[in-house]
Image (spheres, grey):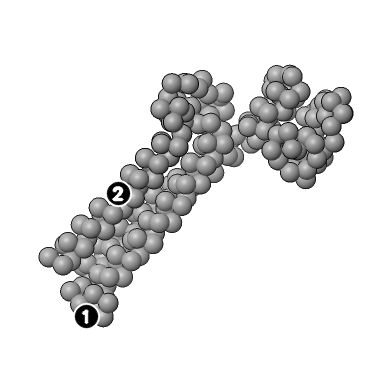
């Protein structure tokens, strides 16, 4: 029996409609329909919620679908890795643009008389790419939060397709709001410091 059949069987046993089941595990009715027709596959968080609701283990729920689940985990991990790489790539390109802006001689800027046009353009491009990089890292953080990945050990286990051994004492797990704020704050400070140094070098 495949997962799609187990889902329908358990849902029927509980007397739940697709819409009612969707409300219980915080997804849309269309998502449940897609799972039961094998169009899409539940993510790890949804499988956890389903196993709790159906009072069964994830192993029993996905028996025969392990390869599919491993593929889903692999795809999500690749997405996080690509987004992280793209974020740092954007920041790197921004720094290169800033350096080139200072190296290429051009006329004075109409916006900032003490800077050249290329210097101003370099700084603006750097800040724009840095902001885009922060947005991508924010998406990665949201994915990590979705799968409750806080520590490096969690992330490493997830990347191998293993169930993370979650440390309940980890700072990020005990204080998620503060942890997220610190990460965003450090990113903002780093961007500000780089921009400030560039400005100081320009204005002399």
Which image quarter is the C terminus in? Answer: bottom left
The quadrant holding residue 111 is bottom left
Report whether 100 appears left or right of 14: left
Residue at left offset 51%, top offset 46%: 139
Side of 1 relative to 174 (left or right): right
Mark closer to the chain start, 2 or 1? 1
> Secondary structure under badge 2?
helix
Looking at the image, which is closer to me, 11 or 37?
A: 11
Picture residue at 70% right of the left edge, 23% below the top: 52
Q: How many marks?
A: 2
Residue at 56% across, 33% down: 147
Categorize mark 1 by other alpha carbons within 10 Å: few (<14), some (14-19), many (20+). few
In this view, the residue in front, 162 or 146, is 146
Left or right? Give the position of 33 relative to 112. Answer: right
What number is the disc on residue 141?
none
Helix, strand or loop at mark 1: loop
In this rendering, the label closer to the viewer, 2 or 1: 2
Query: Which residue is label 1 attached to?
Result: 107
Whole-percent x, y for residue 187 in the image: 35, 47
The residue sitting at 80% across, 32% down in the picture is: 4
Q: Which residue is mark 2?
A: 189
Any part of residue 28 in sight: yes
- Asked whether 1 or 199 is in front, the reply is 199
């Amino acid at each position: 029996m495949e997962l799609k059949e187990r889902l329908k069987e358990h849902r029927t046993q509980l007397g739940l409609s697709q819409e009612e089941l969707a409300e219980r595990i915080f997804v849309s009715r269309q998502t449940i329909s897609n799972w039961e027709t094998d169009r899409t596959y539940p993510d790890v968080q949804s499988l956890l919620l389903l196993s709790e609701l159906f009072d069964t283990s994830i192993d029993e729920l996905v028996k025969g679908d392990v390869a599919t689940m491993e593929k889903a985990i692999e795809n999500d991990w690749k997405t996080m890795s690509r987004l992280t790489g793209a974020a740092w790539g954007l920041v790197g390109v921004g720094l290169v643009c800033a350096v080139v802006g200072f190296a290429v001689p051009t006329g004075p800027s109409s916006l900032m008389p003490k800077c050249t046009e290329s210097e101003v353009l370099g700084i603006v491009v750097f800040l724009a790419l840095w902001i885009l990089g922060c947005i991508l890292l924010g998406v990665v953080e949201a994915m990590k939060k979705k799968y409750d990945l806080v520590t490096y050990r969690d992330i490493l286990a997830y990347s191998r397709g293993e169930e993370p051994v979650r440390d309940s004492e980890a700072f990020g797990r005990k204080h998620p709001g503060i942890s997220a704020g610190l990460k965003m704050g450090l990113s903002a400070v780093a961007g500000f410091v780089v921009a400030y140094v560039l400005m100081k070098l320009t204005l002399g």
